[in-house]
Image (tube, rainbow, N blue to C red):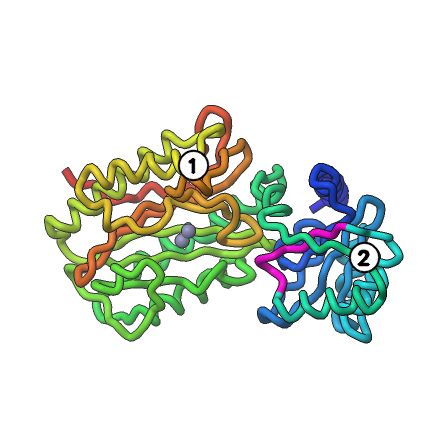
Amino acid sequence: MTPVVYKNRLTALRALLQEQDLDGLLVSCPENRRYLSGFSALDSHLHETSGFLLISPDAAFLLTDFRYREWAQAEAPLFEVQIYTKGMAKLLSELVGQMGARRLGFEGPFLMYATYQKIVQEAEAAGLQVEWRPLENFVELLRAVKDPEEISLIRKSLAITERVLAQVGATLRPGLTEREVAWRLEQALREAGAERPSFPPMVAAGPNAARPHHHPGERRLQTGEPIIIDMGAVYQGYCSDMTRTFYLGEPDARFKEVYTIVRRAQLAAETGIKAGMGTDEADGLARELIAAAGYGEAFGHSLGHGVGLAVHEHPSLSPVKERAVVLQAGMITTVEPGIYLPEWGGVRLEDMVLIHAEGARLLNQDRTFYQFD
Ligand code: ZN
Ligand code: ZN
């Protein structure tokens, strides 16, 4: 990303702060930290953070520990890197004191309770009068609408995924275990230029394909069963996410029926989705078709989700009306209807689309779907 991108993002964030009457924001979500600063370190664990951002109308700090100093300075030139030696909470309260901030936002879903307690205690001990306001989907709102550089990175990430899925998909044979196929995918992803998979590849064969988030195990692929493969790459920080359902041998009537319904539902959503539409409405494009075919109960997850620095991000194409948001041009989401039948298996097909005013552009190049009459 060019430095001007980060400058623009900070400007947009500061406008949001002003709108919400906040004197600053503490950022602890790793993807938000990278999005705003450029600092690309991951958090190795839920409570192994590689740093925080503190952003006010006229200051931008990156708080981290000694191990990340050089890295942070190199990648986040718009931020003043501050190293905590006596704990992050102490340093934070010093900086907040200097800023004279009264109302600070923090990311509720991304701050551990114990860390929050320490922050509040340190601020009180320092005699600061600060109101800590938990926020949800704040920086995420900015992240949801992609800029041209991000779109091109996501396209590259998806191209790697498509190439690998086609390559490994062609090697599926009876007798291979789910785990062996998952390893082939992971290996091929890295060889094709991915920095890592965007999540551990999912390979679910036979009845396991009835579990939307199955973990690959020792089950062997067989003829006469659906096999769901869901996978993605990370390329320069940006994720892709794609699912195809395979079948070894001559498809039976049930597979043909279920597959055809899922594919029709996917096409209905891909051709109908557009900016200005509610996320629940978008979900309905596919859900109504699946329900009308009698499989409504078997499609128990949302139609899709945003993809960017995180593989699952805002917005969610969920059927829940109360949580709906309006789709905007520049958002990238998945379209992934599925039908899952316990003891038999399932079918899921997942593409990625770029939303625009009149519709959506399909980002996938692969169109090798089964077609049954
Ligand atoms: Zn997926
Ligand atoms: Zn997905």
Dot 2 beta carbon under 8 Å from ligand 2: no
Q: Quadrant of residue 67?
A: bottom right
**Residue depicted at 25% across the width and 36% down the height:** 289
**Mark 2 against mark 1, which lies toward the viewer?**
2
Q: Earlier in the sequence, mark 2 or mark 1?
A: 2
Q: Helix, strand, or loop for circle 1? A: strand
For marks 2 and 1, give the CA distance: 50 Å
Q: Residue lying furthest top in this view?
A: 358
**Looking at numbered disc 2 in the image, what kind of residue is underneath it?**
Gln
Q: Nearer the viewer, residue 210 or 46?
A: 46
Residue 119, compared with residue 142, is above or below; it is below
- Which residue bears the numbered disc 2? 129
Relative to 226, 159 lies left or right: right
Q: Which residues are magenta?
A: 103-111
Residue 122, compared with residue 54, is above or below; it is below
Q: Position of residue 339 (x, y in %)?
A: 25, 50
What is the crowding at mark 2: few (fewer than 14 residues within 10 Å), some, or many (at least 20)? few
Q: Helix, strand, or loop for circle 2? A: loop
**Residue depicted at 45% across the width and 30% down the height:** 277
Dot 1 beta carbon under 8 Å from ligand 2: no
**Residue depicted at 78% across the width and 47% down the height:** 23
**Looking at numbered disc 1 in the image, what kind of residue is underneath it?**
Leu
- Which residue bears the numbered disc 1? 362
Q: Nearer the viewer, residue 153 or 352?
A: 352
